[in-house]
Image (cartoon, rainbow, N blue to C red):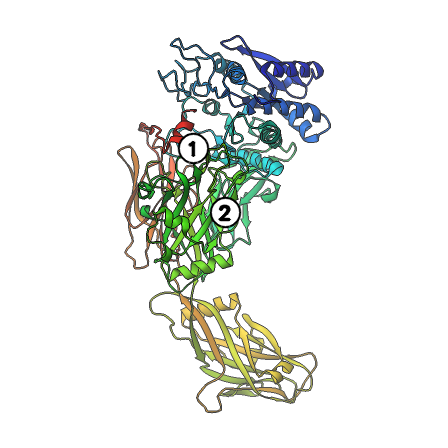
Amino acid sequence: MKKRYLSYQDTIDFLTEAMAKYPDLIRLQNIGDTHEGRPIMMVTISQDVAYADLKPALLYTGTIHAREWIGIELAVNFIQYLLDNYPSNPEVVEALTRNTLYIVPCLNPDGFEYSRNHFSFWRKNRRDNGDGTFGVDLNRNFGINFRQSTNTQSNIYGGPAAFSEPETQAIKQFVELHNNIKIALDYHSQGNVFFPAHKFNHEAEIEGTDLNILCANMAKEIHKVTRRQYGIHRGKPPANLIHGSGREYYYDRGILSTVVEVGSRNIPDYLINMSQSVDENIPALLYALGTAINYSDLAPKRPENFTVRDISANHAELVWDHNPEDGGCYYQVYRNEAPKDPCTRDNLIAITSQSEYTDKQLKSGHRYYYNLRKVNRVNRVKSPFAPEVKIKTNLEKDEFSFTLFPTPEKIGYTGEFLATQNAEHFGNNSLFIGVNKTKGICYGVIDYDMSRIPTDAQIKDAAFSLYPMNRVGAKIENYGEWSVSILDPDDISDITDFEQIHNAVALQTLGDAIDSDQLTQGIWKSWRFSALEKQLIQDQLEKGRLLLRLQGPDSLPQGHDSQMMQFDIGYGRFGGGIHYRPSLDIIYNRRPNEATFNATTCHTVSHIGVTQGELQSGFDSNGQRIFGHVEFMLPQLSERTDIVITDAYFVLESEATNGISQPMRFTVGMVDNDKLNYNSIKCSELIEFLGYEVSSHELVKTPRQTFMFDSSARQHLEDLHDSGKPINLIIRATSASRQQDAIVQWKTLSADETTVYPQLVVEYIERRKQQMDSPDNVQASLEDGLVKLTWDNPDSEDWVGTYVVRNSFHPPRSPFDGVKLYAGKDGYTLDRFGNTNIPKYYSVFNYDNVPNYSVPATLKFSTDEVTPVIYDEFEAQDEMEQRYREGD
């Protein structure tokens, strides 16, 4: 058996000695006895431990499953860490001053000792079931969603009744007597993942943001130590995976609760893997302990009605309610660019006492995730988080975007030993990627149809996103990596053929590969394309396809049977729905049209009059300024749709320079003035300057000069075009010293009299600029236990489809602020994953091909009728998953 591990008696001896040494800091008590008479020991640690029960508390439970030794090892080491660092470490002092730690190192002492001494793979407790079998899975014996079973031999047998076991009775009685418990962490192995509690709704809950951020911030502390990344996964709808767990029991009592699955083996090598797992989790535990007070009655109330008021390509206006009792608080605003990211000082973007904040300098067409909480000015206690707000910024005026999803027959996996079955893996459930002894080497394959992207598209930005669903098959620490490659579709005649996919030569592998200790489940993984990779997409546009291969390790070390990762595809019985389909988000420009326009008319304007057909600027004999005036009249550039001017420049060429003795500079500006007289032009305020000034010295060297329109000038030019108004430009001379008879003659006609000067060159694209009208007649009803939404589609040639999103907390003002239910041309959809008993908001948006989204049509759905929720029974996709779910 492995060395260095503690026995249960070793643990009790350690705790007894610690209490004797630190009587004001630690208290030890027996909260119940097991079937075999062992005491279930509860440790209480807090500054002035006599008052511990008056403080907000964190509950730690470990080794509820006998073979998962990390629970007891981490508990003992964390206690030792607290004792060693009190009072020298200010973080430990603050955590124990404000909070209390209740810690049960081993909730299953009988099973643990049986695992340690007789059968290491033992999972349950040691109840004599009376039929020759022993044991109840204690993590199926709690009262929330308990399921009756008679299969006493099963590793997940939940017992004859809820709380039938002395171990679960003991923790139940303790929790019910301690309403100060605010966070509960239940430590298990294996998986390197947090499993936050849920209420079997598979809808967002008011504490969902708190749970995700608690786990994400703990994961960040873990990452600091070993660079290992933990996933965060609440479970995939609609399957009901666990019955009678402690996690859901605590959560049902209003306690933030999560399971922490540590490591990739239950009883790993102590000196390497177990010691790493212990060391990396201690800072995470300390963080969690310090946050318990934020969920207590001492904390400010959660901010309400946090939402987005306005979104542009580069900013987002966030707003929330400010209540009178919030006078002693300020707000912290956090921004992330990925879901389930931490909220720490690194991404704290604002501290404000206002009830609104505008986030600027954002990237167009990008997703952002905002979180908000209050902080008490005096004691710095923080509130729970408001429900997260999710947005996607608008596109720039010249940008389009498109999100590609694979059709069912174009996504799946091919296995080395599954030749006759590989075609069945497409459009069905999951991607298995890596290698194991049953399937052999497995590749994921995604074949995107790019025919809906215009052939003249110029790829500006691209990102591929994939949802990691389960990493339990990746059993080897620090072994192998997973990556995504672009294949040439011309090389593959059958995407379901293993040999063709296996032997294909990659055109390019995207970005960084994922090392095994960076694999996470429940957190979207995205690869953003480099310049070279974007060019490859550009090349594939002509073929109309983008073929991706997902690959993992292709061999196993001696003595191992699996290094396999599972990703969702959004289809099939086990898919999470369309929300979880692998996506390819592309932002692109269109190749612009170019048009050159000759000046409609030119004038020289001086104090003595206006000369038509001549263009001069400079200073007259009295030193008074002479202005050049140029007018352009743009025709309607497109009859079919709106236009966006993407570039424009004014071309001016000097014909002669006379009398310039001192340096002069010339500027070109736009004016909103059609009065051609000296005083009017002299007093006109320039609306926009074009490009940079040009000097007389430069004119001598380069008579032909180009003045570029900046973004503001292009917008003004576009507005003038849309309104059919002329473009008036003024050429103005400036000089540092007074000059007389210093004039530049600008060319107005070519030598052969075929070309009129100056010229205006305009590059433009056809692109709709305004929003679609909102959907009409949006209604909701119940149909076969599901919410059915209906609406009237608009009669518009620009309409591409309708987008439907659900939000449990506030009306979604952005199509991305909630759970996507539908996008397409139908006039209805069903909310297949929602719980009809829970009130919620639905927003319906129309969109065009840019896409520009309409103002939403929003309704709140609620019903007094209670609709039964039917949970799908769990059914495994393969033998390995079946064994895992059955506790084998």
Q: Position of residue 315 (x, y in %)?
A: 52, 52
| 490 or 234, nearer to the observer | 490
Q: Which residue is tagged 2?
A: 368
For residue 871, above or below residue 745:
above
Q: Earlier in the sequence, mark 1 or mark 2?
A: 1
Which marked residue is nearer to the observer: mark 1 or mark 2?
A: 1
Residue on which disc 1 sits? 235
| Label number found at residue 21 | none
The answer to the question of whether label 1 and label 2 lie on touching residues, with beta carbons closer than 8 A, is no
Query: In the image, 799: left or right of 662?
Result: left
- Mark 2 element type: strand
Q: Which quadrant, please, contains the C terminus?
A: top left
Quadrant in the picture for residue 442: top left
Alpha-carbon span between mark 1 and mark 2: 23 Å
Residue 471 located left or right of residue 352:
left
Judge left or right: residue 147 versus residue 30.
Answer: left
Where does the image place residue 624, in percent across and percent down from the top left? Answer: 63, 84
Q: Nearer the viewer, residue 204 or 110?
A: 110
- Name the amino acid, label 2: Tyr
Q: Nearer the viewer, residue 296 or 160?
A: 160
